[in-house]
Amino acid sequence: MSLRHQYNSSKGLVKRRTNYGLRAKWLTLCIILFAIELVIVYFRIHDVILVISLHLNIKLDWIRGLETNCDAASDQNLFNYANPLLPTGEDTSPIPLCPDSPPYLLGKQDLGNENEDVDMNSLIKNYTHVQAGGRYQPKECTARHKVAIIVPHRNRERHLRQFLRAIHPMMERQQADYGVFVIHQTGTGTFNKAKLLNIGYTEALKEDNYDCFIFHDVDLLAEDDRNLYRCADVPRHLSVGIDKWDYQLPYDALFGGVIAMTKEQFNRVNGYSNEYWGWGAEDDDMYVRILHSCLGLERAQYDVAKYRMAYHPSDKSNRVNPYRYTLLVGAAERQRRDGLNNLHYSVVDNKRMPLYTNITADVGKPPLNPKTNSFGNGIDIVVSISLLVLMLTMTCCTCVKSRLPHVLLCPRRIP
Ligand code: UDP
Ligand code: MN
C-alpha cells in the first residue's frame, strides 16, 4: 500500500492510500483465467461450458448469438448440405391444400385418467379412421407435410396405449398426413434412445417420403391440440411446458421430449449421436449439433405447448450415463462421424400393427471401454475444470460488469 496525493475541491490537497496489492491479484486472476480459456478453446470444451451454463440458466451473449444468428461459413464442422427448405406444398392434386389453421381444433384436450390402463382392443375398435401401421391422411384436403412420429420404446406398454389414445384423434383434428412409428429396443441391454430415434428416421423413410419428423417421448401427452405437430424452417421444440416442472423450461437449452425437424434439418445435423448409452444428455448433444450447424431453433407457442408427463420410476436398463458430459465435450467434434452416417443396427421385427408401425431393433451394446473423445474417460477432470472455469468466468464477468475495470485501472481508495 502506498500514499498518493490527490486534489479534493473542498479539502484541498489530501493524501490517499492506494491498494496496488489488490490490483496485482486481479491481474493475476485474469491472466490465469485467460490461460484456462486458451486451454478450453484448444480442447473444444466450449460446448460443455455452453451446456453447463445453460443448465444453470446463465445465458451468455455468445450462446444467444449462436441460437439466432450464426456464421455458417466460418464453421468447419458444418455439413455441406443445401439450406433446409420446407416442402413447398404446391397444389398439384385435385383436392385442395389443407388450411393453415385446421378448423376442427378443440383447444384443451381431455387426456383421461392418468392411471387408467387403456384397453387396446377398444381403441382399435374406436379408431377406425386410422389405417394399418398407424397411418392417416385427411380426406377433405391435401396436407402440406408428411409427418412421421417416432417414439422410442421399451417396457412402457401402459404409457404407449395412453399415447396412442391421445395422438390419433389429435392428429386427425390437425388434418395431418402422418404415420406413428414405435421403435422398440430388443433385449435388456442398456437403452439407447438417440440411436432408436435415428433408426426410426431411417426406417420411416423406407416406408414413405416423410418430410417432417416428430421425435416423441412415449410418456408425454399434448394437453392442447393447437400445438400443431408440424415442422418449420428451423428445428422446433414442442414440449415447452411440462406439468412435472410447473410448465417451465428447467433450463433454456432443453431440446428434448417432443421436437420437430424436417428431413433436411435432421440430415444436416447428421441425426442424433449413437454414443449415448443410458439416460441423459443425448438431447443436449442435439442442441449442440443444431447450434454448430447454424440451423437456429424455435420453441412452440408457450400457452399451447403444454404436456402431461406420465409418472414412471427410473428404468433399470436406462441408468444415468456417467460419460454423458465427456461425450458432450466432443459433441461438435464427433458430429461429422457419429450419427446417421455410422448407424449400425439390425431390424428384428417390422410389423404394421393396427395403430402404429412396430420396429423392433437390435442396437448393439455399449463399448466396453468407451473412448469418448480426445480426453479419454477423464469425465471428472473435464467437468470439474469446466465448472471451475465457469464459476471463475462468471465471477470475472460480474466484476467486469460492476467495478473491476475501475479497480484495475484506478488505485483503490480507502477513506
Ligand atoms: N424409454 C422407454 N423405456 C425405457 C427408457 C426410456 O421406452 O426403459 C423411452 C420413453 O419413450 C421415454 C423416453 O425414452 O419417454 C425418455 O426416457 P425417460 O422417460 O426415462 O426420461 P425422462 O425424460 O423422464 O428424463
Ligand atoms: Mn419420462
Image (cartoon, rainbow, N blue to C red):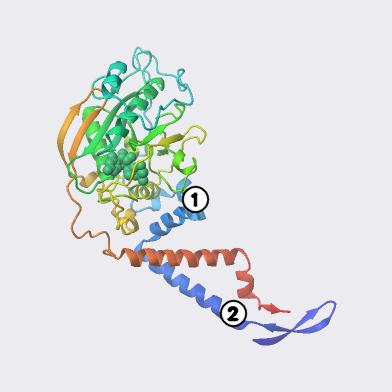
Ligand 1 within 8 Å, label 1 CB: no
Residue type indicated by callout 1: Arg
In the displayed orientation, state which residue is furthest to the bottom: 2
Secondary structure, mark 2, is helix
Q: Ligand 1: give its quadrant.
A: top left
Q: Is residue 286 visible?
A: yes
Residue type indicated by callout 2: Leu
Residue 174 screen position, x and y as percent: 41, 22
The residue nearer to you, when weighing 372 against 38, is 372
Residue 134 screen position, x and y as percent: 27, 24
Q: Is residue 148 above or below residue 193?
A: above
Q: CA distance from mark 2 to mark 1?
A: 34 Å
Q: Is residue 271 visible?
A: no
Picture residue at 29% right of the left edge, 24% below the top: 119
Picture residue at 26% right of the left edge, 59% below the top: 372
Label located before the other in sequence (2 or 1): 2
Secondary structure, mark 1, is helix
Residue 53 screen position, x and y as percent: 46, 57
Which mark is on residue 22? 2
Q: Locate the C terminus by quadrant.
A: bottom right
Q: Which residue is mark 1?
A: 64
